Amino acid sequence: MEIKPPLPPFTLETALQKVQAAENAWNTRDPERVALAYTIDTEWRNRSEFLSGREAIKDFLVRKWAKEQDYRLKKELWCFMDNKIAVRFEYEWHDESDQWFRSYGNENWEFANSGLMQRRYASINDMPIAVTERKFLWERS
């Protein structure tokens, strides 16, 4: 059985650890690595797209990061209870025409006893920005 500590029920310390681990993983832009944090039968809503299963998540992430180039993310714990965590986030990316965007949103997470995420519901809005407005000034990949 796959186990992904820290396990629920969450404390402030372990909820913060989960959020940081998610931020770190997503910033790798590695669909294989990111997908390992989710149950095999995970359920997602990402914007208007509904996904089910780890393989669908991998495919989604490949598409996402092909479009959202030089993606950089920051997550912040909003609240937590038992096996649930809510986060706010913002990330920056550019498209193939080199137009930069900042995307803002909220995610609601529900975890299995194994510590793997079984549900992720994300609401996201994009705002075009000038390159001079970037907050997350990592090197391009």
Image (cartoon, rainbow, N blue to C red):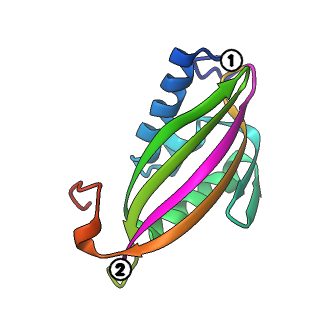
Residue 91, how many percent across, how many down? 43, 56
Task: Give the mark nearest the N terminus, 2 or 1.
Answer: 1
Relative placement, left or right, of 108 versus 130 is right
Neighbor class of circle 2 (other Cα within 10 Å; few <14, some 14-19, many 20+) is: few
In this rendering, the count of numbered labels is 2
Q: Quadrant of the N terminus?
A: top right
Q: Residue at x 70, y 20 (%)?
A: 114
Q: Which residue range is magenta in the image? A: 99-113
Relative placement, left or right, of 48 versus 135 is right
In-front residue for pair 41/122? 122
Magenta stretch: dominant secondary structure = strand
Q: For the residue marked with disc 1, what is the amino acid?
A: Pro
Q: Residue at x 51, y 69 (%)?
A: 126
Q: Provide the secondary structure element on which disc 1 rests.
A: loop
Residue 47, how many percent across, how many down? 67, 63
Q: Provide the secondary structure element on which disc 2 rests.
A: loop
Taking 140 as reference, is 24 above or below it? above
Residue 133, how many percent across, how many down? 28, 67
Is 106 included in the stretch rendered in magenta?
yes
Residue 54, how many percent across, how many down? 69, 46
Residue 63 visible? The answer is no
Residue at which label 1 appears: 8
Is 2 included in the stretch rendered in magenta?
no
Give the alpha-carbon distance from disc 2 to disc 1, as whole Å: 40 Å
Residue at which label 2 appears: 99
Q: For the residue marked with disc 2, what is the amino acid?
A: Gln
Taking 5 as reference, is 38 above or below it? below
Q: Residue at x 32, y 80 (%)?
A: 98
